[in-house]
Amino acid sequence: MAMRMVGMALGKNVAMVVVAGCSSVIQGIGPKNAYGYPVLNIAFAAGPAAASGMWRAFKQRNKDVTVVVWAGDGGTADIGFASLSGAAERNEDFIYLCVDNEAYMNSGGQRSGSTPHGAVTTTTPEGKKENKKELLFIMLDHNIPYAATASVGYPHDLMDKLRRAKEVKGFRYIQILTPDPYGWLFDPSKTAEVGKLAVQTCYWPLIEVVNGKVRISNESLHCLKKETRRPLKDFLSVQGRYKKLSEKDYEELEKFVDDLWERILSMIS
Amino acid sequence: MKIISGNEAVALAVKLARVGVVGIYPITPQTTIIEELAEMKAKGEISTDVVRVESEHSAMGVTLGAAVSGVRAFTATSSQGLLYMHEMVWWAAGSRAPIVMVVATRAVGAPWNIWNENTDFMSERDSGWIMAFASSPQEALDLTLQAFRISEDPRVFVPMMVGMDGFILSHTKTNVYIPSQEDVDTFLPPRRQPYVIDPETQESMGNIFQPVHYMKLRQSINEAIVGAKDVISEVGREYEKVNPLADYKTLNVEYKLDDAEYAVVTMGAWSLDAMEAVDRLRERGVPVGLYRVRYIRPWAEEEIERALGDKKGVIVFDRATSLGRGGPLYLEMRASLNNPVKGVIAGLGGVSMNKKDFMDAISRSLEEIRRGDIKDVTWYYPGEVKEVELGTPRSAI
Ligand SMILES: Cc1ncc(C[n+]2csc(CCOP(=O)(O)OP(=O)(O)O)c2C)c(N)n1
Ligand code: SF4
Ligand SMILES: [Mg+2]
C-alpha cells in the first residue's frame, strides 16, 4: 500500500534500494519486480551504504534519479542503524523510508528496537519491557535537512511529504507507521483505521522538519494539548498484541506519549 | 521419545545444558529455536538470560562476552546471519572461548533464497571452530549437548558449531529421545574455560601479540582442533549413558562399506535418501556403500583413509560450493585420498534430491569412474526440477 503511494508521489525517475524485509518478498519472483522501478535488493544492513554509492554514480552519469531506500523498522532501528547513521552524517543525497510496522514481520513477528512497550511478539511473549526507540529524534540529531513521520492512515499527508522530500537535497528521512494486521492482531480490513487511531490518540505524530523548521500536520495539531488528545486505549484496545498490558504498562505508554509531545513542543517554542 | 522438530530439539538441548546466556536474532529457518527459548523463558522453564539483540554481529558479541566472563553461552543463526556474524565467529575462535552455536543452513544471497543449502555453514571451515553436521533432529540434539562438553574440555577449548539442514531438519518433526536432566547433569561437568575475565584474575584477552606469538596462537588452535578427535570419540562413548540409542564412537558414519567397491560420500539429512539409493543399487548388484561425514573440523583423515582408501572410486555429493573449484567436501576428500574421486554438486538453494535422483547421479558417476574418464565436478539437476513454491511473506527471508 505504502509502495503504491511512493510511486504516485515520486514519479518515474526513481531507483529503489530494498533491504531484507516484507518488501523484498512481496515484489514477487525475480528478475522482474512488481514495483515498476528498478530495484536493488540488498543485504539487511547495507541499504544506506548502497544508496550512497548509487546516487553518486547517477550524478557522475548526469542522470536525475531520486534514490530511495526502503527498509523496515528492524532494518532501520537495529541491524542497519550504523549504516543509516553514517549516511545521514555524510548527508548523502537520497530518501530513506522506514516502513514501521513495529516488529520483524518478515521473519515471523519478533520484537525490534521499534516495538512499543507492552506489545507481545514471538520473542517477547510476556510483552516487551522496553520503550520504542525514538528514531525521529535520533535522526534529527544528525542535523539532516529533511525528516518526517507519516501514517498509511493518512495517504495525502504521506504523499505531500514525499513530494516535498523529493525537492530537498541531501539526506531525507521519512518514517511511515504501517499497521500490520498479522503482527498487531486486528482484522486486515481495519488497517487504515488503525493507522488513523494511532494519530488521533497521539501515539503517532504527523510532523515534518525541513532545515530545522517544524511543521505539524493538521491531523496532529490537537495533540499539542493533553486535554484534546483522544484516549490512548482507543488505539491499544483494537489490537491483540496489547492483550497482556497491565495498568502499569498502560501508564508507561501514556507517559511515552506525553514525553513525545513535550519534546515536540520544545522544538517549536 | 517426543515428536519434535530439529529446532525444538536444539532448544531443548540448550535448556538441558543449563545455558547461562543466549544472544538471539531472528532469521529463517533458525528462528523457531530462539522463539522457543523466549517462550521457555516467559514460562519460567529456564533461568537463561535471553538477550534480544539488534544484529547477528551483536548476537555473537553478547554470547562471547558472557562466555569469556564465565558462563555457558549459546547462539543460533543461518545464512545471511552467519555471514553478517562472520567477524565475531573468528573473534570467538581466536579467543579460544568455549561457545556453542547452531546453524540451520540456508542458501546465501543474492538473490534472496530461504531454502536449504550448506554453503553458509561450510564457509566457516577456516574460522577455527569445531564443526559437526547433523542428519536428524535427534543428532541435532545429541551433537548440541556434546558440543558443550567438547568445547569446554581443557584439551580442546575451542568453540563448536553444529549444523543442520534448514527446513528439512529444522522444521520437520520426528521422534526424538529426550535425555533426562539428571543424565545430562552427570554428563556435563560444570563450566570450564581457559580463562575468565574477572577483576580478581586480572586476565585480559585479545590485546596485541608479537607476530611470533600470534602465529603460535594460531598453531595452538590448529593443534587443539586436530587433537579434538580423541576427545570427540571419548565424549561420544560417554554420551551413550545419556542416550542409550546413540552411536558417536567415531567421528563419521559408515553404511554398507565393508564389502563395497565404490563409495558415496554425503553429509546431513539427504544421507538417508542416498542410503536408500545405495540399498536399491545393491539389489541390482552394484557394489556400493556410503560414508556420512559428521565432522568437518576436525577432519577425520585416518578414519577416512581406513574407510575409503581401498575403494575403486569415491563419489562425493556436495550441497555447497566453493565457486570456481567445486564442492568443499569433494576438495577435502581429494586431499585425503589417492584413489579416484568424483564430485557432484546438487540440491543447492532448495532443489530437492530424492532416492531416484541419487540413484541416477550415482550411476552416471560410476560410469565415468569405470571408464577411467572422470569429469571433475558435475552440477546435477534432477530429471524434473520441481517449481519451488515461495512461502508466505511472513515465513520468508
Ligand atoms: C543479516 C541478516 N539477518 C537476518 C535476516 C533475516 N531477516 C530477514 S527480514 C527480517 C525482519 C525484517 O524486519 P523489518 O526490518 O522490521 O521489516 P518488516 O519485515 O517488518 O517489513 C529478518 C530478521 C537477514 N535477511 N539478514
Ligand atoms: S501484512 Fe504484515 S507481514 Fe504481511 S507483508 Fe504487510 S507488513 Fe509484512
Ligand atoms: Mg518491521
Image: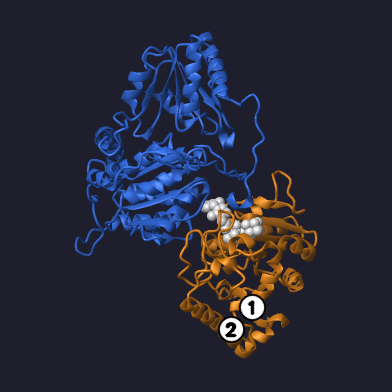
Chain colours: A orange, B blue
Q: How many marks?
A: 2
Q: Residue furthest left?
A: B200
Q: Secondary structure at mark 1?
A: loop
Q: Which residue is mark 1?
A: A205
Q: Are marks 1 and 2 on the same chain?
A: yes
Judging depth in this view, the residue of A227 and A267 nearest the camera is A227
- Is residue A146 visible in the rendered structure shown here? no
Q: Quadrant of ligand 3?
A: bottom right
Q: Which mark is residue B10?
A: none
Label 1 sits on what residue type?
A: Pro
Label 2 sits on what residue type?
A: Trp
Please identify the quadrant where the N terminus of chain A is shown. bottom right
**Quarter of image, res B161:** top left
Q: Secondary structure at mark 2?
A: helix
Q: Which residue is mark 2?
A: A261
Please identify the quadrant where the C terminus of chain A is shown. bottom right
Q: CA distance from mark 1 to mark 2?
A: 8 Å
Percent position of residue A238, x then y: 62, 71
* Ligand 3 under 8 Å from disc 2 Cβ: no
The relative height of residue B89 versus residue B303 in the rendered view (above or below) is: below
Judging depth in this view, the residue of B364 and A116 nearest the camera is A116
Give the mark nearer the N terminus: 1 vs 2: 1
Chain letter for mark 1: A
Give the side of residue B228 with respect to residue A14, left or right: left
Percent position of residue A169, x then y: 70, 70
Marks 1/2 in contact by CB < 8 Å: the verdict is yes
Percent position of residue B167, x then y: 52, 41
- Is residue B280 visible in the rendered structure shown here? yes
* Ligand 3 under 8 Å from disc 1 Cβ: no
Identify the residue shown where x is 68% and y is 85%. A221
